[in-house]
Amino acid sequence: MQRQVNVWAVNASLAALTALLFIASIYIGRGGELLADKFALISETDPDIARLVMMEVRLPRALLGLLVGATLGLCGAALQGLLRNPLAEPGLVGASSGAALGAVLVFYFGFATGTAMLVPVGGVLGALAALGILYLLAGRNPSIVTIILAGVAISAFCGALTSLALNLSPSPYAALEIVFWMLGSLTDRSMAQVWFVLPFMGIGWLLVASTWRALDALALGEDTAATLGFSMRSVTLRAILGTGLAVGAAVSVTGVIGFVGLVVPHLMRPLVGQRPASLLLPSALGGAALVLAADLVVRLPVNGPELKLGVVTALLGAPFFLWLILRARREAP
Amino acid sequence: MTRLSFALAALLACLAAPAAAAPERVVSINLCADIVAADLAAPGTLKSVFRLGRDPEDSPAAALIADLPPNDGRIEDVLPFAPDLVLAHEWTSPFTLDLLARMNIPFVLVRDARSFDDIRANIRLVAAALHREAEGEALIARFDGEMETARRDAEEGPAAILYQDLGSAVTPGSILGRILAHTGFRNVIESDNPVGLVYPGIEGVIELRPELFALGVYRAGAPSQASALLAHPALRLYLERHAHEVRLPARDWTCSTRYVARTAARLAAAYDEMKAAHSTSTLPLREGQTALIASHLQEQSVVGGLGRGR
């Protein structure tokens, strides 16, 4: 009973934190400028444009931070549960880099002419392909080492192909564009991108969330889960398909934002316990909060290009992770 | 220090060669050097150019050197031509320059031009190395004439921003900033820095209220994050309602050479359009007028081979 209260309290406070950061994300601009000032200033020129800045610059940025962060947190928690591996995350198993590769191929090689909707489709297909290859490589009874090695190999390979594709594209700024796809950014996106990703993410989230009971059962081992009536095949398929859809869509509009999917479930475990099912919602909320917070840090420098989001999530995430490792070592007998 | 020693090596190499003989086997390994040399080299003496120099998207002089064999700027690409002069850039890899110096191949380094004087100095430098001083002076006179034609003097010129791919805007001290001022515009970016670029972001650009929105466009229609940025709805609406738009093909200014006069001419034309529109009415431009002028300008740029979405 105590635990239940705990989980709900954690969820509620995470939701409140996320909401706060969401509002801050809309309200605080470049170099810490406040929305009210900017709104007044631009309204003098044209109130329509001020409204457009609000609706097409600030709002989509905050929404994408929310959606992408939630996606990464949720999928990270689900993958860690599914693979029973504390190192699983969309980035580590190759989904993110596969998605970046798919999106880059569509975006830069002209398949996107006609309908821009094809870019997220490319991202989704790339992520699914990467996860599919991982599944084939790791086999039916994947060991931790196999999955990690295969994931690292797929990530590195997709990363190399992305760089290659950009080097071969006619873009003169290929090096900078590679950085965008590898490190991620929410800067100056518009609602068009939000509408792009929403259906993919929605379906992806539902698929991933639908595995929650099975993830709990899986914590007891595959055989136990099978005897409890869960089909491994269906669970794996749903989790992987859902991750592919959601992460693929996320990466195709923001580039790869690393570390969130890995760190957030670890941060949540001490709060809500080890059960994979009860970890899903807090991880989604925590992921959203982390990405929104990182995106606030990114916009603080006044001059020069903004930092890349992946840089900040790694800067925030890596020390946390090291601290977790140290604590785990201390607690170990 | 390294640069100085290279310059010294180049000088010594030049001195070592008999002063009277004009170089006959010239190889350029840099786009910016290609463009200057294309105008100046005696027929048949330029043996190879950097690969980008022949690309009409990158090089305003592409037509002049399209038939020359391209090189990739590596020492191995240069040696087969047995050059008696190599034209490079101050930013050319020091390793390549070191190898050239060791092989006693004289080279000349074109400088990154940030002012009109730098452009003239580069022309003089290459002309002297090629023993074509007279042609050099004629070219400078032509450049000066074109720039004079594009000069517009205004007490308080229209506010302008020159916004390029990747969301950067040019500062007053950059070559494009100087051209903006030369053609009568007031750059809304007032700060300066060594790179010559600032990153105001979409909100920042709108807040600065430019009346002219000059877009530096690299390879119109080629997909990039940069071109995606320029299609942002907030930016589009601002352009539609409040600003003139003129598109400046990057090939005329990525290397600051005499061809920046074309950029100046485009800006001067935009200035005249805006003045004409203002003088017919004291009221601010109405939407229709803006659209008309914008479409006219766009038409111009299509004629100039700059059409959107090739």
Image (cartoon, grey):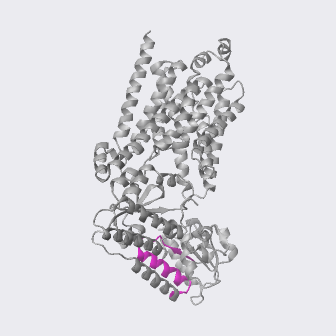
Q: Residue furthest top?
A: A1
Is B127 above or below relative to B247? below
Start and end of the magenta stretch?
B107-133
Image-based side of B270 in relation to A269, left or right: left
Residue A310 visible in this rendered orientation of the protein: no
Is A150 above or below relative to A162? above
User: For the point 42% across and 61% down, which residue is it?
Assistant: B291
Is A8 above or below relative to A37? above
User: For the point 54% across and 86% down, which residue is it?
Assistant: B132
Q: Position of residue B97 (x, y in %)?
A: 57, 70
Q: Position of residue A52 (x, y in %)?
A: 38, 46
Q: Position of residue A130 (x, y in %)?
A: 65, 37
Residue A27 in the magenta stretch? The answer is no
Is B233 above or below relative to B305? above
* Quarter of the picture holding the N terminus of chain A: top left
Residue B124 in the magenta stretch? The answer is yes
User: For the point 56% across and 67% down, which residue is it?
Assistant: B58
Residue A282 visible in this rendered orientation of the protein: yes
Can you tell which quarter of the image residue A139 is in? top right
Q: Residue furthest bottom?
A: B20
Foreground: B87 or A51?
A51
Foreground: A145 or A244?
A244
Foreground: B206 or B112?
B206
Count of marks, rendered view: 0
Q: Position of residue B280 (x, y in %)?
A: 32, 70
